[in-house]
């Protein structure tokens, strides 16, 4: 199990995966919006999305949990 | 050995010295993928160690060959270089009285000769039994660090970390220009995991607390992470080629090469949408001599890229925002990383090229608590102080203090070039319209909001149009992206004779 975390503070702009989706390592799972920039967050591991922890529009801090991959 | 003839005695001593420590320690080294210190030196130098001093240190003790450190002089690419290299087969490379004296002497030699010094570190730290001789005095271990500071900026100082660098010894890498660490074997820490458990009750393993990967990705104490010792040595040989022997001379100019060939041009890889990410490495590859990029701190604060390269054979230092990582926003760690790199290049006459695509410094509570202003000040300080040729290129955008940190017009770059389509402003159009009209927009009927915002953004874009800034002499040149390499070649060539008088003072008060 791996938790994908935010690398900077910002707002969740788009959640690109749903629970049950199969993802590959390197695939973007969430796009944050921060400092007016789109910040894609990729999973470093492949697997199944077990849990989406954030919703679009949420403010999150750096290191916040975003998605759980199994 | 008292019964041997003089000749045989000498031969026996020599053999013992060349052999290093006990066989079991050599075997342990091999198991860990470590080379013997003399093998390392064979690989490092063109033709091995040419001169060795103090090899007979502690020879009478019998079990301390060379007192655990080899010091001497060899050649790299035909250039003279001094070296100190710990021997981990002798008391785990620990420092005894003569170890320290030998290190101090080779530092003094490097200063006299005006040549680079390499520190090949693999040492458990102080030899407690020798502490009175090696720790507190005028020529105790502290002198090594004092000398490093004295030599900093005079001659290149390079650290290759092959094993531990413990306690006080951890300051050798800390005072070097660059630190290469071998993953799995290299480590830096003030107190070992065992000590951490005893003294503060923390249970932790060495890799987590002070391993190479941790230092190269999180703490920033390591600059280059490599898998093998051979790779570390290759990096050092390559790195040194960008530098002069000392601060009084300029780096060598190598045979010029054209940039590598790519299907897509620079113009095609830069997205027109300011907010979309692109890979800055793709731009760098298109403007530098093929295969000439030698990156420093690749894994640390990757939102800024720092590396040595060549343009037309000439050494340059590149500082580039990376929109692919954290939007290219500047953070405390990225500012800190850039500050040291700028200072390194400036010390050794390496011109600086800033490639700006920066939305600004990060904001918010988290980074304010981390002192982002203080760290940002380091970068701006180092960049302002630099007197080497300074070229500022606005690739796509430079907003807010990001413009300042990336050698914007107020900081005496020799030129500020904008690529067509670049934007320079206090903030981007989205943020600006929001800042100025937030109340008005809120009071407006919902159906009118979108068109109002779009109109105002367009007005703002016209206001910050790059040709308007050029017509006001704020920027010096606007060029098409595909002409960037050529423009840099010409600029670097004509700026070669740049001279700047130093400000009359002792030194600035550096924000640290």
Image (cartoon, coloured by chain):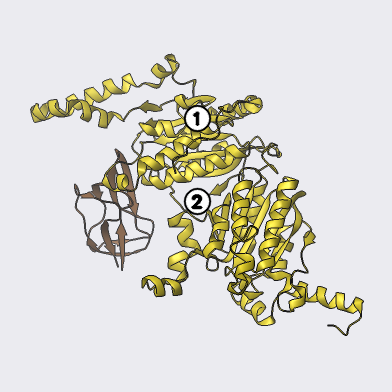
To which chain does the residue with label 1 belong? Answer: B
Q: Quadrant of the C terminus of chain B?
A: top left
Is disc 1 placed on a helix, strand or loop? strand
Question: Compared with residue B471, is residue B373 higher up or lower down, i.e. above or below?
Answer: below
**Label 1 crowding class (10 Å Cα cut-off): few <14, some 14-19, many 20+?**
many
**Who is closer to the viewer here, B238 or A29?**
B238
Vertical placement of residue B410 versus A2, above or below: above
Chain letter of the brown region: A
Classify residue B266 as left or right of residue B157: left
Residue at 74% x, 72% y is B58
Q: Nearer the viewer, residue B486 or B70?
A: B70
Please report the residue visible at 42 percent of the width from the left and 35 percent of the height from the top.
B357
What chain letter is assigned to the residue under label 2? Answer: B
Task: Give the colour in which the image draws chain B.
Answer: yellow
Residue at (46, 24) in percent of width and height: B409
Residue B402 seen in render: yes
Residue B216: percent from the left, percent from the top? Answer: 48, 57
Q: Earlier in the sequence, mark 1 or mark 2?
A: 2
Q: Position of residue A29 (x, y in %)?
A: 30, 54
Q: Which mark is residue B392?
A: 1
Which of the 4 image quarters holds residue B399? top left
Quote the CA–CA distance across marks 1 and 2: 21 Å
Against B345, residue B102 (above or below) is: below
For label 2, the residue is B298
Q: Both on one chain, marks 1 and 2?
A: yes
């Amino acid at each position: 199990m791996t938790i994908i975390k935010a690398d900077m503070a910002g707002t969740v702009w788009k959640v690109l995966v749903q629970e049950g989706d199969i993802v590959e390592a390197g695939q973007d799972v969430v796009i944050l919006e921060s400092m007016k920039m789109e910040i894609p967050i990729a999973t470093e591991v492949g697997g199944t999305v077990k849990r989406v922890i954030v919703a679009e529009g949420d403010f999150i801090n750096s290191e916040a949990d975003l998605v759980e991959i199994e | 050995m008292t019964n041997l003839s003089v000749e045989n005695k000498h031969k026996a001593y020599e053999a013992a010295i060349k052999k290093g420590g006990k066989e079991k320690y050599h075997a342990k080294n091999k198991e860990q993928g470590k080379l013997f210190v003399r093998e390392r030196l064979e690989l490092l130098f063109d033709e091995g160690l040419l001169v060795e001093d103090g090899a007979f240190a502690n020879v009478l003790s019998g079990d301390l060959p060379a007192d655990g450190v080899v010091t001497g002089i060899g050649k790299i690419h035909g250039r003279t270089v001094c070296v100190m290299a710990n021997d981990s087969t002798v008391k785990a490379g620990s420092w005894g009285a003569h170890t320290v004296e030998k290190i101090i002497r080779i530092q003094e030699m490097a200063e006299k000769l005006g040549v680079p010094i390499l520190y090949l570190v693999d040492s458990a730290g102080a030899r407690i039994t020798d502490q009175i001789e090696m720790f507190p005095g005028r020529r105790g271990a502290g002198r090594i660090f004092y000398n490093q500071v004295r030599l900093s900026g005079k001659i290149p100082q390079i650290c290759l970390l092959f094993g531990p660098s413990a306690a006080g010894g951890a300051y050798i890498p800390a005072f070097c220009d660059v630190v290469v660490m071998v993953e799995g074997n290299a480590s830096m820490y003030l107190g070992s995991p065992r000590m951490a458990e005893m003294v503060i009750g923390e249970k932790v393993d060495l890799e987590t607390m002070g391993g190479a990967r941790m230092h190269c990705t999180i703490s920033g104490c390591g600059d280059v992470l490599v898998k093998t010792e051979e790779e570390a040595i290759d990096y050092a040989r390559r790195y040194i080629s960008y530098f002069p022997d000392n601060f009084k001379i300029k780096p060598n100019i190598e045979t010029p090469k054209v940039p590598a060939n790519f299907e897509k041009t620079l113009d095609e890889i830069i997205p027109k949408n300011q907010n979309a990410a692109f890979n800055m490495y793709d731009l760098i590859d298109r403007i530098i001599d093929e295969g000439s990029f030698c990156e420093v701190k690749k894994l640390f604060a990757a939102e800024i890229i720092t590396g040595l390269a060549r343009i037309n054979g000439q050494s340059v230092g590149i500082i580039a925002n990376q929109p692919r990582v954290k939007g290219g926003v500047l953070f405390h760690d990225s500012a800190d990383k850039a500050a040291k790199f700028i200072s390194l290049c400036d010390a050794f006459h390496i011109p600086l090229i800033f490639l700006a695509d920066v939305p600004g410094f990060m904001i918010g509570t988290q980074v304010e608590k981390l002192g982002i202003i203080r760290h940002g000040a380091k970068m701006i300080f180092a960049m302002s102080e630099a007197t080497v040729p300074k070229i500022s290129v606005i690739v796509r955008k430079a907003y807010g203090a990001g413009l300042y940190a990336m050698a914007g017009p107020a900081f005496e770059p020799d030129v500020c070039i904008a690529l067509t389509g670049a934007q320079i402003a206090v903030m981007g159009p989205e943020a600006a319209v929001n800042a100025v009209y937030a109340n008005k927009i809120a009071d407006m009927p919902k159906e009118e909001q979108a068109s109002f915002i779009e109109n105002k953004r367009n007005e703002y874009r016209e206001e910050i149009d790059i040709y308007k800034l050029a017509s006001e002499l704020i920027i010096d040149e606007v060029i098409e992206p595909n002409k960037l390499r050529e423009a840099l070649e010409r600029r670097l060539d004509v700026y070669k004779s740049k001279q700047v008088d130093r400000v009359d003072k002792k030194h600035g008060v550096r924000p640290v």
